[in-house]
Structures are given as structure tokens and as C-alpha cells.
Amino acid sequence: MKIPKSLHKYFWDVDVKKLDPEKKPYFVISRLLDKGNVEAARWVKENFEPNLIRKTLQNYRDFSLKSASFWGLIYQVPLNQIKCFREPYYSTRMTLWPY
């Protein structure tokens, strides 16, 4: 599985050619769902099982609160199970960026 060239722009801080979505699925899913567009969301849906996407929401904290809420609704993950809404991460985030 390779990340399409049109989605490389969402991985500005890594060498996309060396990034293996099968070895780093949480990172790829979270980056594309949080920062990506409709094409990125479609690619994630077509290439990853819904359970893996749910696990990403539950285990990977680097989502914005807004996108985590949205994807939690789409993939039926309650907010209290989404990592970026759980303590201590949520409190820390609110003291650093209270919006």
C-alpha cells in the first residue's frame, strides 16, 4: 500500500517515500483524517478497516478536538473513549491552548 502523491502534502515532516502505512497505520490515519481533505478521508476509508480507524481515535492523541469529535461521530466512538478528550491530555491541552 502506497500513499498517493496527491496526499504527500499532509506528510510535510516525514519522508513519505519511506513511510509504510501498514507499519504506521495510526500515524497515517490520524494525519489524513485530521489534516486531510475529502480525498484523504476517502483513501483512509478504502484502505483501512473501520475497527483500525476506531482504534486510532481511541489510542492516538494527536487529533484536533474538532476533527476527533467529527470522526468519533462518523465511526461511532464516544468522546470519553477518544484519547485527545481523556485526562491528562485534555487538561494539558486546555492550559496550553484554551480554544
Image: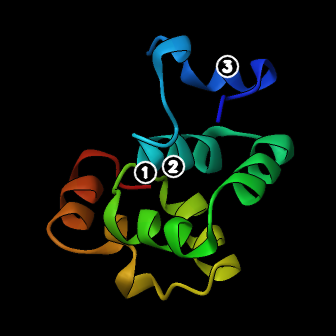
Q: Name the residue under label 3.
A: 8
Q: Mark 1 points at which residue?
A: 26
Q: Estimate how packed mark 1 is, as few (under 14), some (14 to 19) or many (20 or more) residues with alpha carbons within 10 Å.
A: some
Would you say the residues marked 2 and 1 are in contact, meaning their CB atoms lie under 8 Å apart?
Answer: yes
* Image point (21%, 61%), residue name: 89
Q: Nearer the viewer, residue 75 or 45?
A: 45
Q: Which of marks 2 and 3 is nearer the N terminus?
A: 3
- The x, y position of residue 69, in whole percent, is 57, 72
- The x, y position of residue 53, in whole percent, is 55, 66
Type of amino acid at the residue the image marks with label 1:
Tyr
Number of marks present in the image shown: 3
- The x, y position of residue 36, in whole percent, is 70, 39
- Outermost left residue: 88
Give the distance between the C-alpha atoms of the residues marked 2 and 1, in whole angstroms: 6 Å
Q: Name the residue under label 2.
A: 30
**From the viewer's perspective, is residue 61 above or below residue 73?**
above
Instruction: Give the numbered dot on residue 15.
Output: none
Type of amino acid at the residue the image marks with label 3:
His
- Quadrant of the drawing holding the C terminus: bottom left
| Mark 2: secondary structure | helix
Nearest to viewer (mark 2 / mark 1) = 1
